[in-house]
Structure formats: structure tokens, C-alpha cells
Image: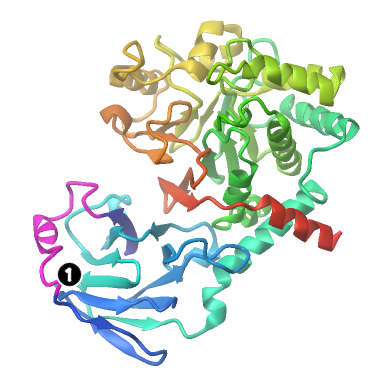
Amino acid sequence: MKPQFENVGSSSVFPRALRRLRNYGREGAETIALNPHQKLCLSSKIIRISLQNSAFAIEIGEHRLHLYPEMTVNDSSDQSPSDLIVIDPDSYFSGMGHFKRIRPSDEIVVRYCDDDRGGRFHSGGHFIEIEHEGNALVLRISTSAPQANISIVSDESAARRLVTRRTRALERVIDIFGGPIEALTPEDGLTLLRTVNDCLTRSPYRPLAADGHPGALVELPERLTPVLIGDLHARVDNLLKILSENAIMEELDRGNAALVFLGDAVHAEDPDASASMDTSVLMMDLIFKLKTAFPDQVFFLLGNHDSFSEEITKGGVPQGRLWEKHIRRVRGEAYYAELQKFYRLSPLVALSNDFVACHAGPPRTRISRELLINARQSPRIAEELFWNRPKTPAFPSGYTRGDVQRFRKSLGLRDDMPFIVAHSPFSTVETVWQDICRIPQHHMVSSALADQVGVFTRIDNNIVPQVYSAEILLPWVNQRASVHC
């Protein structure tokens, strides 16, 4: 039995009894301050525990959960009160594991269901309900649950393991980059990009197109755990945050994980920085360093902003033209030509046995594996893959549920295969959206927000979203790099 996490009220599968009881007895519940050697028995009655900036262990029969106050790599919390990270300590530190972040005022259910339920939430099994009130935790377990108790994690090193692992991951990124993460010299940048383009001409997971070059489709082997990263739009800190979390760097080094960028790495969205291209250059330098370090585990799917096209604008700013002028000015004509080559060589679609992904959306016409491989020779197909948007009141001509179903069927994919895109965020306050426009198993991710960063990955054989709090990391990373150089 594995823990499953979900926000209360976000799905109709939770039993009505749970929703009725959420507020029962809450106002009269006494707030208890645990001491380091105390174990408090939990029950179906509401129990409120003072947070005290402590880490907690919850035991439910033979299962354990740990709740840690989230800290930055500087060992301090950015929020007061801080977010809490809920993990299964028996699996989380052995590789990439699922977790849940609880922000103040959030309420989640941790449900234990049989493994053969495919990671979906059902009304069966037993659960624990956890609410973050800011200065206290409110807890209640189901009447069907075995004996449960909560205690303070007394070993301070246990609570610091999350920070320690993240620090080591960022030090590994420094090692890969070769020092402080700063824009490369024109000569080093050109050498790096030529190496990347050489990698792109001989990818083992890209079937050859009719012209003899690797096609537009990447077919990932099952052994690689994907980390699907949405639009970054020049937020280097957000990429560093992703790389520092959840053993991603460890699994890359072990050859077990793959980074799949869903395009639009460049061009800042902040109106005050939309005309600046310096962070876009740095973003591509970092992605190219990752590609050369892990040539068969890092894949960049082309987005509509990954271009010098005059069509690329933001708030009236001609970002495509500015990108071209900036590259020619700071890196030179040879680099400009190599970057154009990179755009021509980059794939458009990623496919595995449990997901399919592209930047924008499915082609509106019938497709096939062969047509996807040769999409570069079909401009309409290529354009739709990195320009399409779902049908909404703002985009009435967008693609529909029928287009997604036809796309899956044309490729011989099962009806519930997760199809993940970026490109069209539905709001500026969220970073992942599931079942967008009521299309089952069609999800969207943006990784460019200032306060949170979303990805999709595979945990316990299921493609799931993971959301991290954004963090300013570049100054810390470069200070660390300078000390060690």
C-alpha cells in the first residue's frame, strides 16, 4: 500500500462523509504542543498540533509519513509560517519519490490504497486528513485506519536531509557547467553549441526521417524516468530549482532519468524584462551544458519562441527580431548559424509507453508515426505542434477533445495515455493544469512563474505533477562556485 496525496475538495471521488465531517469539532479542538519525547495517538476526532517549527513523524500502522518545514538551501524559510513538505521517508530518499506541499490554509488527504489501483484515488482504503492552519496542524484519520500516532522528528539531521540533497545537486550542476553559471565567452559558447548539434545528428532514440537525419519524434525507453519541464521563458532560477529537487540530478547521473524540455526556454515574460535577452542566452548555455553532459537523457522539444521569427512578439515587443540581433551581437555570425541549425535539428514530439508530449497541441489533421518522424518536411504539422492552443472562448478555433482523441488513435496510443503540453497557461497563479478543457488525461505545465515551478514526472508508474516553490538560486550557486574554484 502506497500513500496517495490529493487536495481536499479537488475531486468528487472523496466520500461524502469526509466532506461533511471536515468542520465538525474543529473550533473546540485544543492546540497541543508536543515535546520531543512524546507520541500522541491520533483518532477520528480532530486534533490540533502546534507547529513549533518542528518536523513531525506520523505512523499509521506499518506506514510512515514525515512533515518537514520547507527550507531554502540557505537553511532558512522564505515564508512565515513556512510551507510543509509531506513525504514517505521509506521511499523518498532512495530516488525520485512523490511528495505533497501544504501551504498555509491548504488541506490534503493522504490515502492508502492497494498498489493495483494504478495510483488513482478511490473511496476505499484508509486516510489521514491534514490541514495547515499556519501555526498549527489539524489532523484526523478515518475510522478504518489502524492505530496512528504523531511525534516530533528528534534527529535534526533527518529534517535537514532535504536541504543537504538539494545542495549536493546544485554543486553537481556547478561541476557540469564548469564554474559559476554565467554567460559563456563567444568562443566557448560556439564550441558548446557545435557539440550539441553534433549530438543531435546521432540520437539513438530518434528514428530517422526520409532525409536520413534524426526525425522530429523522440521515443524514450521505459527505463528513463521523464521530467517534463514547461515553458521557462528565461527563468534560470526555476531551472536550477527543478534540478535541485527530488533526486533528479542523482537519477540523471545514474542514467535513470531524462529531462524533456517542452520548448520556449527563452524570452522573458516579465514586461520589464521582455526586451532583454541576456538571461535567454544564459538559459540556453545551461541547457546546452546539460545536453552535452547527458546527451541521451536531455531532450529539447521546439517551442514557438525558440526561433528568430518576426511573428514572436510579447506585449508589442518583437522578441524574435531582438533575439536574432542580440545573438549576432554577443555571439557572432557563426553562433547565429549554429543556433539556426539547432532549431532545425531539434525534435517536436516525445513519446514513451506512458505519455506523449509536445509544446503546443496536436495537429488538427490525421497523423501517423511516420508523419511525425517526417514533420520537418510538413510545415503545417510542425507549425501546429508548436503553435496550437486548446479551444477556449479566447481561442474559438483551437483544438478540441476530438482532436486529442484522433491524435492518440492515429498513433495507436491508449485512450487514457497522458498527453502533456505547455504553451497556453490558463492563469498566472498556477503552474500545472490537469484534464484541461475537460479533456481526460490532457495536461498542461508552465515552469515560468515567479513563485512556483511545475513539472510532470513518473512516480510509482504514474505520470504525476510536482510543484516546487520558486527560489532565487543563481547568486547562491555562483557564490558557492566561486568558493570552490
Q: Main secondary structure of the magenta part?
A: loop
Q: Nearer the viewer, residue 428 or 126?
A: 428
Q: Residue furthest bottom?
A: 37
Say which quadrant the N terminus sits in. Answer: bottom left
Percent position (x, y) of residue 409? 35, 21
Q: Is residue 237 above or below residue 97?
A: above
Relative height, residue 362 to residue 48 (above, below): above
In front here: 304 or 253? 304
Residue 338 in view (yes/no): no
Q: Position of residue 360 (x, y in %)?
A: 47, 23
Q: Residue at x 42, y 46 (%)?
A: 465
In the rendered structure, the answer to whether residue 470 lies left or right of residue 47 reads right
Q: Is residue 71 visible?
A: yes
The x and y percentages for residue 361 are 44, 21
Disc 1, SS = loop
Which residue is drawn at the image coordinates 57% and 79% (left, top)?
157
Residue 38 image offset from top left, x and y in percent: 35, 91
48 magenta-colored? no
Locate residue 319: give its quadrant: top right
User: Which residue: 30% across, 54% down?
Assistant: 6
Question: Which residues are the magenta region?
Answer: 8-27
Reply above or below: 248 against 133. Answer: above
Report the residue that reaches farthest toward the right: 187
Residue that mark 1 sits on = 142
Left or right: residue 233 versus residue 187 is left
